[in-house]
Image (cartoon, grey):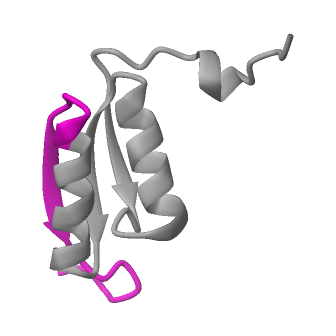
């Protein structure tokens, strides 16, 4: 019998998260993992297409999702 890790056992129902770099890689995995545990997710990425793709997957998991396109490496105005 395996022991669940804290992340696997947490319920995020009713919570909201902003995930940077969510268009791919670790950011995408985090966004989808949070959504799978009941969290609504705001997907932020430098690539609009990649962010939209992740947001679509979040919505397929039954959660709300918004998209923000921003390069966090640049100065914000």
31 relative to 10, above or below: below
Q: Residue at x 17, y 40 (%)?
A: 59
Q: Nearer the viewer, residue 2 or 9?
A: 2
Asked if the magenta segment contains residue 60, the reply would be yes
Q: Main secondary structure of the magenta part?
A: loop
> In the drawing, does residue 40 fall left or right of residue 6?
left
Q: Nearer the viewer, residue 36 or 12?
A: 36
* Residue 36 part of the magenta-drawn span: no
Residue 66 screen position, x and y as percent: 13, 50
Taking 50 as reference, is 5 above or below it? above
Find the residue positioned furthest to the bottom. 74
Q: Which stretch appears magenta?
A: 59-77
Residue sitting at the far right: 1
Residue 56 image offset from top left, x and y in percent: 17, 52
Please tell me in which quadrant of the rendered image residue 76 appears.
bottom left
In the displayed structure, does residue 15 sit left or right of residue 55?
right
Up-down: is 32 above or below 7? below
- Which residue occupies 39% across, 62% down? 20
Quarter of the figure with the C terminus: bottom left
């Amino acid at each position: 019998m395996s022991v669940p890790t804290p992340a696997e056992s947490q319920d995020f129902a009713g919570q909201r998260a902003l995930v940077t770099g969510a268009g791919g890689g670790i950011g995408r995995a985090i966004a989808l993992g949070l959504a799978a545990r009941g969290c609504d997710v705001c997907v932020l990425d430098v690539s609009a297409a990649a962010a939209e793709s992740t947001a679509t997957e979040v919505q397929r998991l039954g959660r709300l999702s918004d998209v923000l396109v921003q390069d966090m490496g640049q100065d914000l105005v």
